[in-house]
Amino acid sequence: MKEKGLLIVLSGPSGVGKGTVRKEIFSQPDTSFEYSISMTTRAPRDGEVNGVDYFFKSREEFEALIEQEKLLEYAEFVGNYYGTPVDYVKETLEKGKDVFLEIEVQGARQVRKKFPDGLFIFLVPPSLSELKNRIVTRGTETEDVINNRMSVAKEEIEMMNLYDYVVENDQIDLACERIKAIVVAEHCRRERVEPRYIKMLEVE
Ligand SMILES: Nc1ncnc2c1ncn2[C@@H]1O[C@H](COP(=O)(O)OP(=O)(O)OP(=O)(O)O)[C@@H](O)[C@H]1O
Ligand SMILES: Nc1nc2c(ncn2[C@@H]2O[C@H](COP(=O)(O)O)[C@@H](O)[C@H]2O)c(=O)[nH]1
């Protein structure tokens, strides 16, 4: 029988760089994970495409998905719903492929209960001031939303001990290498094979 894939969950406070790091990992030719596109009621940002960045839904549509148990997890985050489509995740894992979720902390806690064998990684910024700088520089949120996201960020960072690994996103390429190395090491551990040579970048 084919081995099921590994469920990889990446969380971290808003603006830490989850999306940037995830896109960089997925742009690399050696990446074999499948990204699960989330559902959200948030309005699309400039350049975001339905079915690529998110499946954009109305609140009524989202609540119907909750009712029909179509979501593996969902959460309300700073005024909007976000959730993971359950069928896609289960079918992809069944095919033996690793699935990568990029979700916030409440959702990750729900996934942990359903998939205790998942791999849970928390991305942290070098400092809170750098976190704020990143979210402000991104320029996609109003000042009010930034302040709300920053206060949630402080609570989320306190929950990092619920994760298997904490990775600092000081530099995008280093954060990507760390995450990829963790996934390779976890596969080796779970499949009880000799670790393959992991090419890490020099860390000064
Ligand atoms: N290592 C880094 N150094 C400097 N800037 C970074 C780094 N990683 C990401 N950024 C920048 O920080 C901003 C926020 O990144 P990104 O949108 O990926 O964060 P996020 O964690 O996905 O946020 P959200 O949870 O709000 O969607 C972006 O402008 C991105 O270019
Ligand atoms: N619980 C879930 N959280 C999700 C999901 N998809 C994204 N997210 C997280 O929401 C916040 C805000 O995202 P943004 O795109 O509005 O900046 C961020 O932490 C995302 O990681 C999901 O399916 N479930």
Image: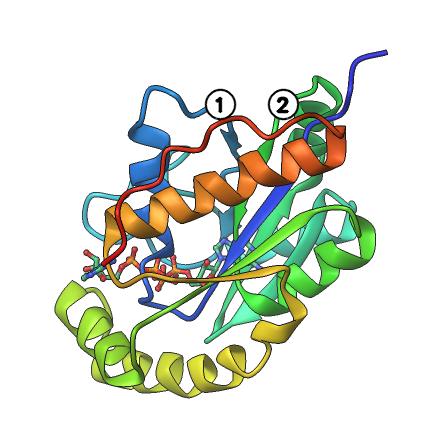
Upstream in sequence: badge 1 or badge 2: 1
> Residue at point 69% right, 20% down?
96
Residue under pointer 2: 97
Residue at 65% from the left image edge and 30% from the top image edge: 88
Count how many numbered circles sit on residues in the image. Answer: 2
Residue 20 visible in rendering: no
- The residue closer to the viewer here, 135 or 42, is 135
Tag 1–tag 2 contact (CB < 8 Å): yes
Q: Quadrant of the C terminus?
A: bottom left
Query: How far from the left and from the top, in percent, is residue 114?
Result: 81, 51
**x, y (%) of residue 40?**
49, 53
Secondary element at tag 1: loop
Q: Is 118 on the left or on the right of 40, as rendered?
A: right
The residue identified by callout 1 is 32
Q: Please, what is the three-letter code of the amino acid marked with disc 1?
A: Ser
Q: Quadrant of residue 183?
A: top right
Q: Is residue 153 above or below residue 44?
A: below
Q: Nearer the viewer, residue 201 or 136?
A: 201
Q: Estimate the x, y position of residue 70 in percent, counting from the top left.
A: 72, 42
Q: Residue at x 70, y 46 (%)?
A: 118
Outermost top residue:
1
Q: Say which quadrant the N terminus sits in.
A: top right
Q: Of helix, strand and loop, which one carries label 2?
A: loop
Real-space Cα separation, disc 1 to disc 2, in angstroms: 8 Å
| Residue plotted at (27% across, 54% down) | 203
Residue type (three-letter) at the residue carrying disc 2: Lys
Residue 173 in sight from this viewpoint: yes
Q: Is mark 1 within 8 Å of ligand 2?
A: no
